[in-house]
Image (cartoon, rainbow, N blue to C red):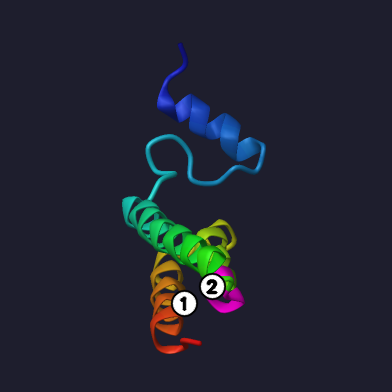
Amino acid sequence: MPDAQTLNAVMKSYGVSGGIGGGFNWWGILASVIFGIVGWYAFMHGWKQKSIRPSVIGILLMVYPWFISNVIWTWVVGIALTAALYFWKD
């Protein structure tokens, strides 16, 4: 079994950044889980109420972490979308 340095070198040669042991950021995963749950609830609430606004914001909350790699921006966008969900009611 190759060690972590060998695996990191192979992954880097294929253009994969992060590597073994440093590829995950737990704050980013936590933000994705929290805002994913809020987004799922918003989507389901909007679906039941036949309201498009919470449904769209819910979908955005569930999907946006896939496209943002910076942890700080993940939290900023998640908080902004959650605030929009709260303050921008029908």
Residue drawn at 40 percent across, 56 percent down: 37
Q: In which quadrant is the N terminus drawn?
A: top left
- Region of the chain picked out in magenta, as a range: 51-55
> Vertically, is 29 above or below 70?
above
- The residue most toward the right is 14
Let me know if residue 3 is in the magenta part.
Answer: no
The earlier-in-sequence mark between 1 and 2 is: 2
Q: Which residue type carries mark 1?
A: Leu
The residue carrying mark 1 is 81
Q: Which residue sits at x=39%, y=43%?
A: 22
Residue 25 location, x and y as percent? 37, 51
| Cβ–Cβ under 8 Å for marks 1 and 2 | yes
Q: CA distance from mark 1 to mark 2?
A: 7 Å
Q: Amino acid at mark 2?
A: Ile
Decide if residue 2 is on the left or right side of residue 59.
left
Q: Is residue 78 above or below residue 21?
A: below
Return the residue nearer the eye: 38 or 64.
38
Per the image, the residue denoted by label 2 is 57
